[in-house]
Amino acid sequence: MASAPANVIIPRSTLDARMRRAFALARVSRDALRRAHAIGGVVNDVAGVERRARVGEDVSRRRTMTARASSRVDVVMRGDVRGVGKMFCVRTRAYGSETMRFQAETRRLLDIVTNSLYADKEVFARELVSNASDALERARHEALERGVDPGRLEIRITTDDADGKTLVIEDDGRGMTREELVENLGTIAKSGSKAFLEGLEGAGADAASNIIGKFGVGFYASFMVSDKVEVISNAGERGDGKAWKWSSTGDGTFTIEEASESDGAPSRGTKIILHVKEDEKHLVSKWGIETVLKKYSSFVGFPLLLNGHRTNDVGALWLKDEKDLTDEESIAFYRFISGAGDMPTFRMAFKADAPMTIRSLVYFPAENPERLAGFGGQANSGVSLYARRVLIQDKTERLLPPFLRFVRGVVDCEDIPLNISRESLQDSMLVMRLGQIITKRILKFLDEKAKKDAKAYNKWFANLGFFLKEGVCSEYAYKQELAELLRYESSSTEAGELTSFREYAERMAPSQENVYYIVAPSRQQAEASPYLEAAKSRGYEVLFLYAHIDEFVMQHLMSVAGKKLLSVEAANLDVGDSKSEDAGTMDETAKSELCKWFGDEALGGRLKEVKMSSRLVSSPALISGHEPEAMRRYRMVQTMASDAAASKKLAEMSNDFSMLTLELNPKHEMIRRINAARVSADEDTRRLAALVAEQIFDNARVAAGSLDDPRAMLGRLNEILEKTLPK
């Protein structure tokens, strides 16, 4: 038989035996039909030549149709007719309704969408609301182009709280014609929103920014919770004056027919009716839907009504300019997204169109959000990621570095690459770039606030500065920007008054080469420290660091403004120009003998060295070579968390003085008296001299913060008091 020309109707009488067998097999082989490819009646054969064979046969006696008795069966052939088992699909047609198979391998793809694509079934509501929002935006845009009133534009959701069998989602959007229902819903991954965006020109930029969908699979998420889905749509003035009804049970076929009066078709727009699965009714209750809407769709750009009550009262404020934000609506928005009850100290509205389209609104809380997290607790990220006003990730962990977890707010980026379910991000490098842009903008914003309103910033820093210090230790890339934001008290400021490294550098003496600091539990102890005496005598300002983390911060920074950061404990500064020595000052021989007595007899050879010091003014002694206070505190925490053997080992380490040096002030009256008492003929006096020498050593350990348990001194102190009181 010669090849038939393309698109000709071949009478049954001309078909050969192979065609008759093919038709018979196609009619009886259901498995073959399910594997067949529906391609609209025109297909390519192996040689690339289009053929179409339409065979008319009355099958009314063998098949019950949903409409009238006169029916037809279309057999669509693809490739060689001998490939009967794979190459056919059947489309039943009636006057009033038509049942079709989905396009594009949809039986398998629909199963993936329904069972595997989405992590949480609740997102079906987000997807349907997003589709409705896009339809409304398109209707609004078309009305503006024609210069007419778009009419009511809202999304209405109705729950069936009586038995939970149905859920209705309706919008006043542009609706769909019969052909659009077949094209958009009959083909998975066919996105009407994406086609709309591609057709927009420059004048449609505003509409483009409000369109959400682009993958064309969101609608099919409804089958995750539904046994059957009905879509009743009316295209209004641009349609044929009829409303059409699309329905499917998700089994690979769908039915299209004219909507009846009982369907309650809208005059323009789309109405979706979900016939809910028995085990998914909890998701479509009023409470369940409201929870999902507040989580994902609170900022949809059109009124969203649930059983007649609006659920999206708070607007998407991040789309506004800073000058258009009122304090009242801003505070309401902050409390809505954060769940906090405090008043934010600062807010930052940031927009950018290059290199990425970003709209963000972030807040800086007045109170530390981790105070309620308990000992060792850590707050989650407070920034949520949106794309075109729809939530993508709540409390996004990967966006900002951990030290900014105190920030609360929203980042909306149109350019972030999403997976098809819109539940996760695909291009990690692009997301990292977005995070870097936001992070740098936040640090720049805080620096500007610190300069413009130092009082407000310093008050905020006192409560939340810990996070910035953590950032210095954990994020090398931002440590210099963070250094500009740090604030400390100093020997040149009043109690409670903070200063920056920049201000410190401006006050430095010309001869000063380093930025000096001291770690102490309080200002009182810092000012009383013997390590401060040499710096004070030279007129050097010293920063006071009170927090455990501060010493680690200094070790990570190492330098600021070209000046090295140095602890006064390790600086080895002398007191500068010494005045004429007092008459009672010891000579070099006496100094040497006293140091030897201190080390060998009074302290039993436990120290590395005892020597005279030029660093002291009013204190009798200090120690050097000891571990930093921050490390000592860390060791104490480790001791508490360790078993008995480890705790014993750590305790032995704290009582190991072999690396310590005791420095004595030869000008101090107490040192001179000990020198005289140690060679006294009276045994009690010599004993008292040894006891006081030990106490001076322990006092120096207290000043250095290296004495873990002061109770060991009590027996000695009691004996000293006993010997000094008159008998």
Image (cartoon, rainbow, N blue to C red):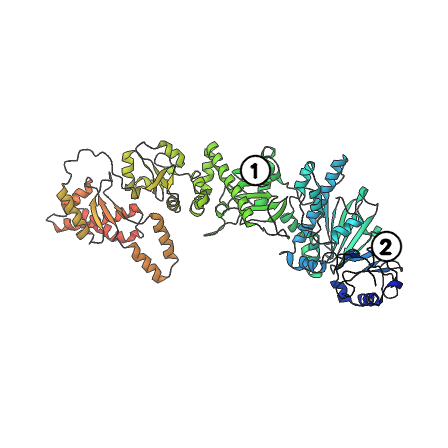
Closer to the observer: label 1 or label 2? Answer: 2
The percent position of residue 290, horizontal first and vertical second, equals 66, 50
Can residue 153 be seen here? The reply is no
Nearer the observer, 194 or 300: 194
Neighbours of disc 1 within 10 Å: few (<14), some (14-19), many (20+): many
Near mark 2 (Cα within 10 A), the count class, few <14, some 14-19 or many ≥20, is: few
Q: Which residue is mark 2?
A: 96
In the picture, measured across the screen, residue 280 lies left or right of residue 400, that is right
Taking 390 as reference, is 510 above or below it? above
The residue under the point 61% across, 33% down is 324
Amino acid type of disc 1?
Ala
Is residue 490 or residue 392 the one in the foreground? 392
User: 681 or 55, which lies in front?
Assistant: 55
- Residue 114's image quarter? bottom right
Q: Quadrant of the N terminus?
A: bottom right
User: Mark 1 = which residue?
Assistant: 349
The residue under label 2 is which amino acid type?
Answer: Gly
Is disc 1 in contact with disc 2, using a CB cutoff of under 8 Å? no
Residue at image location 37% in from the left, 45% down from the top = 555
In space, the residues marked 1 and 2 are separated at their CA atoms by 56 Å
